[in-house]
Image (cartoon, helix red, strand yellow):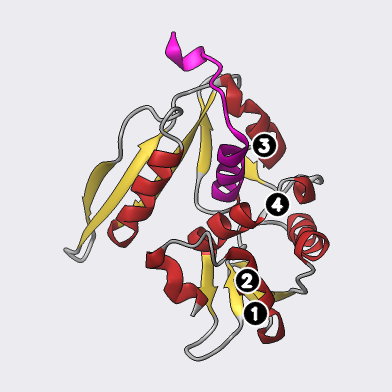
Amino acid sequence: MRKFKKVKITPRQKQIIIGKILGDGHLETNNGLTYRLRIEHGQKQKNYVFWLYQELENLAAGPPRLKIRKGKNGTVEKKWWFDTVFTISLRFYAQQFYQEGKKVVPRLIHRWLTPLTLAIWFMDDGSVKAKNCRCRLLNTQAFDEVSLKRLQAALKRNFDLETKLRQQKEGKQIYIPAGEYDKFKKIVQSYVLPEFEYKLG
């Protein structure tokens, strides 16, 4: 059956997958052996979803689909999504980035954090602190303290980026100070898609 098939993952695809796992993507399994990656974003990120599909097409179970939900207050929410096939090729990522069903950051994250990976992560979970502010944020509130320290260490080791942790109600963000803005922008700018350029300024 195709879902148990080993699928070739290229070095570029590996960078994208890790960026998605650090961001909004998540892995799912039915048996602990084969896994699939779920990608889902809102209507404004439709082009991003289709770009990701093109990048991961050999892994995808099918093209992106539209999901429409009605909110409690009568609003309509549109989301675009697609899954990869269930494959043993994604098991490595599940073993590295999940513990007891919760996302964690592996000890060797510095080996896999590239400019492309950082850009994917930023497009997913990056934000601007305030209008006309050069500071940037990575919304890492779901990660524990050990994971956050590993991410900070990898950003410093790989890109010489100094960061701080910023406490929020639901957890901590990684804070990129104004003085590091130019350096950060230079690292990711060539990979950031047009619809996310507002995050860079």
- Chain-order first, disc 1 or disc 3: 3
The residue type indicated by label 1 comes to Asp
Q: Alpha-carbon distance for marks 1 and 3?
A: 38 Å
- CA distance for labels 1 and 2: 6 Å
14 and 148: which one is in front?
14
Which is in the foreground here, disc 3 or disc 2? Answer: 2
Is residue 8 found left or right of 111 in the rendered image? left
SS assignment at label 3? loop
Instruction: Tell me if residue 178 is in the magenta stretch.
Output: no
Task: Using the image, determine if residue 197 lies above or below residue 1.
Answer: below
Label 2's element?
Answer: helix
**N-term-proximal mark, 2 vs 4:** 4
| 104 versus 57 height, above or below | below
Residue neighbourhood size for the residue with mark 4, other residues' Cα within 10 Å, grouped as few (<14), some (14–19), many (≥20)? many
Q: With 88 as the anchor, is 198 left or right in this view?
A: left
- Residue 77 in sight in this render: yes
Q: Viewer-proximal residue, 92 or 143? A: 92
Q: Residue at x 67, y 41 (%)?
A: 97
Q: Which residue is mark 4?
A: 113
Q: CA distance from mark 3 to mark 4?
A: 23 Å
- Which x, y percent locates residue 43? 28, 58
Kind of residue indicated by mark 3: Glu
Residue holding disc 3? 100
Q: Amino acid under label 2?
A: Lys
Q: CB atoms at circles 3 and 4 under 8 Å apart?
A: no
The percent coordinates of residue 135 (x first, y second) are 61, 82
Do labels 1 and 3 touch, CB within 8 Å?
Answer: no
* Residue tagged 2: 186
Q: Which residue is mark 1?
A: 182
Disc 1 vs disc 3: which is toward the camera? 1
